[in-house]
Image (spheres, helix red, strand yellow):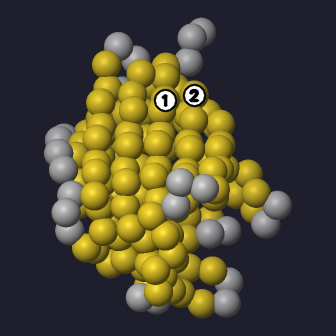
Amino acid sequence: MEIPVKVNVKTTIDEQETFELVVFGRYFQKEQASYLQYEEVLEEGNVRTIVKVAADEALILRSGTLKMRLPFQLNRKLRGSYELTFGTFETTTSTRKLDYSYENGSGQISILYDFAIQESPAGTYHLEISFQEEQK
């Protein structure tokens, strides 16, 4: 069963720069994982994002104008990809903290990780996603 939700995405880079986004999406559970789906409208076009969370791992998939695959697993360094019009870059995530909770129609996902693009450090990112069921 899919639940319509209001999603708040907050990304903080090196505790200095913060980006926030509020969108509407859908939340559902399938097998042992929870999924959050939403779409961003950018100047260049739309980007569809799927966040999958299970036990001690998460995966963020973005498609559309921007393509990205970011895997997270606690205390592990994992390879991902970031695809732009002029090429694909290899990324790595080293996850320091991964928390997820869902209760009574609202959820919270918090991921703290070191991010690198083409083996060049891009900073420490703190991704906080909160979502709650839309009231009809």
In the rendered structure, are the residues bearing label 2 and label 1 in contact, judged by CB atoms less than 8 Å apart? Answer: yes
Q: Mark 1: which secondary structure?
A: strand
Quadrant where the N terminus is found in the figure: top left
Residue with the most extreme top position: 136
Residue on which the image places disc 1? 131
Q: Position of residue 96 (x, y in %)?
A: 28, 58
Residue 132: image x %, image y %? Answer: 49, 23
Label 2 crowding class (10 Å Cα cut-off): few <14, some 14-19, many 20+?
some
The residue at the point 55 percent across, 64 percent down is 63
Seen at 52% across and 61% down, the residue is: 14
Q: Mark 1 belongs to which amino acid? A: Phe
Quadrant placement of the C terminus: top right
The residue at which mark 2 appears reads as 6
- In depth, the one of 106 and 74 nearer the eye is 74
- Please state the horizontal and vertical placement of residue 54, each as a whole percent of the image: 22, 46
Above or below: residue 71 compared with residue 77: above
Identify whether 111 is placed above or below 71.
Answer: above
Numbered mark located on residue 78 in the image? none
| Residue at image coords 23%, 54% | 57
